[in-house]
Amino acid sequence: MKIRKIQKNGYDNGVSLAKAWDEEGLMLHFHGEAAEGEYRLVNKEAVEKLGDEETRQGVNFNLLEFWEKWAISQGDKEAQKRIRSWNEKSVLDLVEEVQQEILSEEFDKKKYPEIQGLAAYEDEEARGIADVFGIDYRRVLLCKDMYRRLVQTRISEGSVSPPLESGRCTTVIFKDSPVGPIIGRNMDSGINAMPGLQGYGEPVLYQYPEEMGYSTADIMNSQGLSIQGSSIGYPNEPTYAKFWLDIYPLILRFCKTAEEALDLIERYNPFFGPSNLLVLDARGDAAVIEKTKNTFAVRRTDTNWIFTTDGVAVEEKTRKIQGDDTPAYQFGLQRHQLIEKLLQKEAKAPSIEAMQRIMSNHTMPSPVCKHLDKMPSFYQGGTLYSFIVVPGDKTFYFRVMGPGPIYPCQQEPVKYSYAFD
Ligand SMILES: [Zn+2]
């Protein structure tokens, strides 16, 4: 397990993070999927060997080209026109502008104690990272999902929802089994993210000074709380979150139980964007939160299982906002129904093997394990990595796509241990 001792001072923390990444052969990247904390990182060697031209450009890659391709794939002429009217310098200036707005925002101390000073800390952290790598600190910010989305939304004037770039994902949970709760998770993305994932998997432990919250390791914290999810868009819902806070680390740093996580999510609802979240605590209490731009619905289950899969909201309130007549929605819904059926059978004897069978199920037309060549044209993604976590045992089984491609379902899992103490 890699250990990062988080510093009280943002700049110092940035310096120490960047030095650790450099020593481990990692670099920042716009194009990667494998993020540590909120930063997108890739393995240098793998990118050299396996990456295409775009991937090899690293942080010098021109995001406008990437966004233009996205706008073309969406058939959004207005967005294309607007994206073409920008140049790289103006994008970086916009990052600065967005950052100044974030830094000048004040949050009620009573309602939002967890984020007092957070923006300033993260700003300093980005400057520390930039100094170690000798790059413009605005490019460092752009390696975080939040900035990419804020900037891109402004460039395309929010004419359509930003693309779902990061993990699309399916997360399935047995709340209880002979080994305690079991988490299964598939991460789906485009194949261009594959090189960035090589060398990824070993959990990274963030040890925070006490006043900064609990220690966290990827999806879990030292209190046994985990947060997972899947991505979803609400293109027809008009309002955008003002401040796209990354809610995952906040929940892990400050919550111990699923109830506490629900309270935090409710308080911070206006500050983060659409996603399906799944929280699970050490006692096996779990909930799915279907978050739209403006509101959310909570799902709890009486069964021994709970799950969420990408692209689909199933609660009445959120389903209505999402709109359920598109091929993309139906594609997600079919998978949702498939998983429900698989769980009815497998949850009778919940085990790591049973979870494995669910996560590598290939029932068409909308399988849990997605192979790129079997996907419909509107879904340009496949399952790039798959893992199982047994929180009670502190074990983590990880499988990642290799060149070929050889999918996670065709690989032997690598076993890691979480060690919070
Ligand atoms: Zn497969």
Image (cartoon, helix red, strand yellow):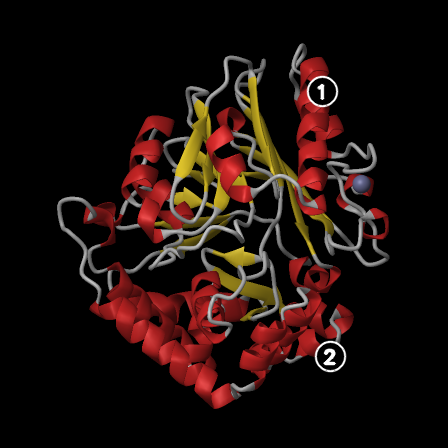
Camera sees residue 11: no
Looking at the rendered structure, the kind of residue marked 2 is: Glu
Mark 1 CB within 8 Å of ligand 1: no
Quadrant location, ligand no. 1: top right
Q: Residue 84 occupies which quadrant of the picture?
A: bottom right
* For the residues bearing labels 1 and 2, Cβ distance under 8 angstroms: no
Q: Position of residue 392 (x, y in %)?
A: 49, 24
Instruction: Single out the residue that lies furthest toward the top.
Output: 348
As drawn, 170 above or below 83? above
Say whether residue 46 is left or right of residue 135.
right
Q: Position of residue 223 (x, y in %)?
A: 36, 32
Which is nearer the eye, 288 or 85?
Answer: 85
Q: Which residue is mark 2?
A: 53
Secondary structure beneath dot 1 equals helix
Which of the two labelled residues, at mark 1 and mark 2, occupies the earlier sequence position?
Answer: 2
Secondary structure beneath dot 2 equals helix
* Label 2 CA crowd tier, 10 Å (few <14, some 14–19, many 20+): few
Mark whose residue sits in front, 1 or 2: 1
Q: Please name the residue shown 81% across and 52% down the image.
A: 372
* Label 1 CA crowd tier, 10 Å (few <14, some 14–19, many 20+): few
Figure quadrant of the C terminus? top left
Q: Which residue is mark 1?
A: 341
Camera sees residue 164: yes
Q: Position of residue 397 (x, y in %)?
A: 64, 37
Say whether residue 84 is left or right of residue 408.
left
Say whether residue 144 is left or right of residue 344.
left
Looking at the rendered structure, the kind of residue marked 1 is: Lys
